[in-house]
Image (cartoon, rainbow, N blue to C red):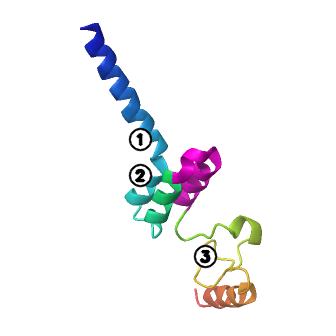
Amino acid sequence: MASFLNAVSGLLFLLIALAAYFLPTIIAFKRKHSYKYVILGINIIGFVGIFPWIAAFVWAAWPADKSLIDPLAGNVTGMGKRNTGDTIGAIQYGKERGYEDEKHK
């Protein structure tokens, strides 16, 4: 009986550990992330170190309407969200469009 309980507890621990390890993938699929399969790939190769897992987790959990570069580039539209084209190289265009959108509110 003790060996059965050890086997069940070991299996339960393994399932919890796998769920924790694949948490970025679970989040990405649950949120219907556009790059869910890329996040899965990063998560699979993430066993080589902690940094791929952290990158996959951040990417999966990051708000879909914000760019990963927003904290560095700032809020270029002034609207609190990212629009297509509002990344490096299109900052001025994003500012102008953001101001125009604000005028029409």
Q: Report which residue position mark 2 lands on.
A: 26
Residue that sits furthest to the left in the current view: 1
Q: Nearer the viewer, residue 47 or 71?
A: 47
In the image, residue 50 lies at what x, y percent? 62, 44
In the image: residue 45, left or right of residue 32: right
Q: Cα distance, mark 2 to mark 3?
A: 25 Å
Q: Report which residue position mark 3 lands on.
A: 82
The answer to whether the residue labelled 2 contacts the one labelled 1, judged by CB atoms less than 8 Å apart, is yes
* Amino acid type indicated by mark 3: Arg
Disc with the residue nearer the chain's start (1 vs 3): 1
Residue 80 quadrant: bottom right
* Amino acid type indicated by mark 1: Ala
**Above or below, 50 relative to 39:** above
Is 59 contained in the magenta span? Answer: yes
Q: Residues within 10 Å of mark 2 (few under 14, many from 20)?
A: some
In the image: residue 17, left or right of residue 63: left
Looking at the rendering, the stretch of residues picked out in magenta corresponds to: 45-62
SS at badge 2: helix
* Mark drawn on residue 89: none
